Amino acid sequence: MAKTYIFLGAPGAGKGTLGDLFCEKQGVIHISTGQLLRDEMAAGTELGKTVKDLIATGALVSDDIVTAMVRARLAKADVQEKGVMLDGYPRTVAQAESLTGILKETGLQMGGAVLIDAPREILMKRLTGRRLCTNKECGAIYNINDVAPKVENVCDKCGSPLYQRSDDSEATVLGRLKVYDEQTFPLIDYYTKRNELITVAIEDAPIEHNFAHLCQVMGI
Ligand SMILES: [Zn+2]
């Protein structure tokens, strides 16, 4: 029976990269809700037209619409054959409950809610490390953790000073992580109670190392 996976993880945890590597290794289909919305609009379906009108008026696309799209996509033959990794869904417990129902209807098995669990200090280090060149014509981007400039705070290419964007400041990053926690804790709780949570502890190590650990935890 084909399996469905969801990946949960804070910004900076490496959820996107690890999810891609997982899909590649397991041959499961990666489906993002953003792409589903774009596909429906491009295909001009009834759902697509509704979504287009909503977006044009600046309204949010409702839970019902997103869930209907996910339900239609999961019923298709490729998903039924290969399994799926959902990206951007579920975001709420209501959506998680809908997904549980969809899996039952479509005969898919829950492979697991994979929590990419990185300690806060790693997230902070990764998310606050970006530095940009002050010379607009140069536009070089660095990260002091992996692609650091040769001389601290000086651009390798043009010698101009570097700066940190306010988006990457400690206060802003802390705010983003708080939003993530508030949105994600209820989902973690939901999947824990269902015995479907798979926690992958991330270390401050290259992605290959963390992916090897994920494979070990998931038995793949
Ligand atoms: Zn520069």
Image: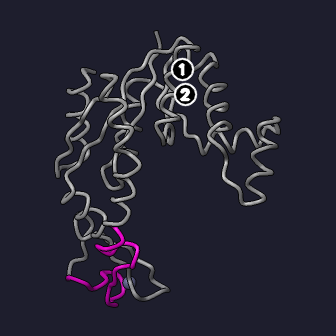
In the image, is residue 16 above or below residue 80?
below
Residue that numbered label 1 is attached to: 101
Location of residue 112 by image quarter: top left
In the image, is residue 69 above or below residue 206?
above
Region in magenta: 152-173
Horizontal side of residue 143 vs 4, given as left or right:
left
Horizontal side of residue 64 vs 198, given as left or right:
right
* Circle 1/circle 2 CB separation < 8 Å: yes
Say what amino acid the circle numbered 1 marks.
Answer: Gly
Residue 64 position within the rendered picture, expressed as x and y whole percent measured from the top left: 66, 36
Residue 193 position within the rendered picture, expressed as x and y whole percent measured from the top left: 31, 26
Which quadrant contains ligand 1? bottom left
Residue 197 position within the rendered picture, expressed as x and y whole percent measured from the top left: 30, 29
Location of residue 74 by image quarter: top right
In the image, is residue 76 above or below residue 139?
above
Q: CA distance from mark 1 to mark 2?
A: 5 Å
State the residue at coordinates (54%, 28%): 98
State the residue at coordinates (64%, 19%): 76
Q: Residues within 10 Å of mark 2 (few under 14, many from 20)?
A: some
Residue that numbered label 2 is attached to: 98
Q: Does 164 lie within the magenta span?
A: yes
- Look at the numbered disc 2 and give the secondary structure of its residue: helix
Q: Residues within 10 Å of mark 1 (few under 14, many from 20)?
A: few
State the residue at coordinates (37%, 32%): 190
State the residue at coordinates (33%, 37%): 188
- Look at the numbered disc 1 and give the secondary structure of its residue: helix
